Amino acid sequence: MAENTDTATLTIKGKTYELPMHSPTGGPDVIDIRKLYGQADVFTYDPGFTSTAACDSTITFIDGDKGELLHRGYPIDQLASKSHYLEVCYLLLYGELPSAEQLEEFECLVTNHTMIHEQMHNFFRGFRRDAHPMATMVGVVGAMSAFYHDSTDINDAHQREVASIRLIAKMPTIAAMAYKYSVGQPFVYPRNDLDYAANFLHMCFSVPAEQYNVNPILSRAMDRIFTLHADHEQNASTSTVRLASSSGANPFACIAAGIACLWGPAHGGANQACLEMLKEIGTPDRIPEFIARAKDKNDSYRLMGFGHRVYKNFDPRATVMKESADEVLDLLGVENNPILQVAKELEKQALADPYFAEKKLFPNVDFYSGIILEAMGFPTSMFTPIFALARTVGWISQWKEQLADPQLKIGRPRQLYLGEMARDYVDIEKR
């Protein structure tokens, strides 16, 4: 952590405290308040931790004002255009882009761990057939600790490494099996002759009765979805993984906790919400009505998939995702899909409207990823599981980084207590 010669001066009830400051390689300086409670007997109050740095990290950097997303210093648009998901996984896990030899070894390692323990199939069959795939994934990923005892010791570097590879390798298999179970089709085993994204599509859409060939355009689009969702700094699910990890929980429990947090519609469900909006609009001729509502200050309605909480200018992931969306729609067409017809026309009208340009409400990554997944044939219930699959490497990278931090402490947020103070118990007959 870089020191700063500046200090922050805080005056509380007439007494002054000097707080050290730290300068990051990117982003605003940080005031170190770790000793404030001990010195001044006060807490800081920051609901949602939106102004609090809970850790230091070298993995991902976001500048929302500039529309910048860097993984280990590499811009996301370059990685999504020139690289592929497993290479980005290596970068996130180990800090540097791999050599050709290192990448081949890493890809082989992941490929050879894609199968899950055969007895885990029984877990899927224990769920109701109409269970949400995310519910299935939370349960099955958490249950991995019951099957892979040789990779649950977080104090063993080798076991941490094995757990990391297993999670990255097996998550597509688990997600595909959750999907197959939800639609009543037989499970499809992974194939070692296919790349990561193509293997996932094959496990989702092939059936034993006939040959299924993965289209390379669809495989590339899926790989980009994985890449663009691989990590996103200290978001809610990543913070959940870190908080669970701080207690010493095993890696499978930590990632299951991250999946559970991602399930929230305010976090991982944005692309699903976008598709539901497109269904609500229904037909292209109704688009002006909904745009007018979004522009009306007296109407709470807003267009899903436009703008971003973090990116105040534009979402750097959206540019690359739009390219994939255009390629997929050119391949599959939109003529027979009213949702995709609405999506294409909404994008066109919104981008041409000065209001959206002035407010910087451009289509974000969720808008385009939802379009792609819909075109591929995925139901909206699978959107968040695919997000979880992609984000697993980010969670693991953050988990590994935290465990290596000598400053690691169990997470323990404080509170502003506004309840009753001590009072005597009243017997029930006197209440």
Image (cartoon, rainbow, N blue to C red):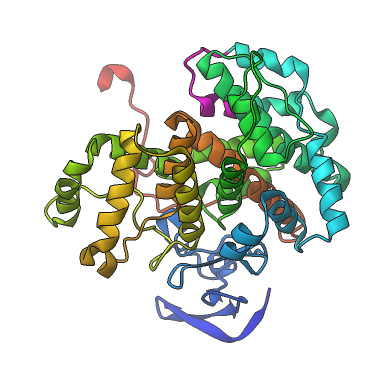
Look at the image and tell me whether residue 139 can be seen: no
Residue closest to the far bottom: 5
Q: Is residue 10 visible?
A: yes
Image x and y of residue 59, in percent: 66, 62
Residue extent of the magenta highlight: 127-139
Q: Identify the residue shown where x is 43% and y is 42%.
A: 370
Q: Residue at x 38, y 66 (%)?
A: 312
Nearest the camera: 401 or 87? 87
Q: Give the vertical position of 131 relative to 46 (above or below).
A: above
Q: How many marks?
A: 0
Residue 130 on the magenta span: yes
| Figure quadrant of the N terminus | bottom right
Q: In this view, does 109 lie to the left or right of 195?
A: right
Image check: 234 left or right of 354? Answer: right
Q: What residue is drawn where x is 39% and y is 58%?
A: 309
Q: Residue at 82%, 29% (x, y): give it.
A: 149
Q: Point out residue 350 in the picture as x, y percentages from the top left corner.
A: 26, 57
Residue 127 at x, y percent in the picture: 56, 14
Give the quadrant of residue 168.
Answer: top right
State whether residue 53 is above or below residue 2: above
Residue 264: within the magenta?
A: no
Is 135 situated above or below 7?
Answer: above
Q: Which residue lies furthest to the left in this view?
A: 298
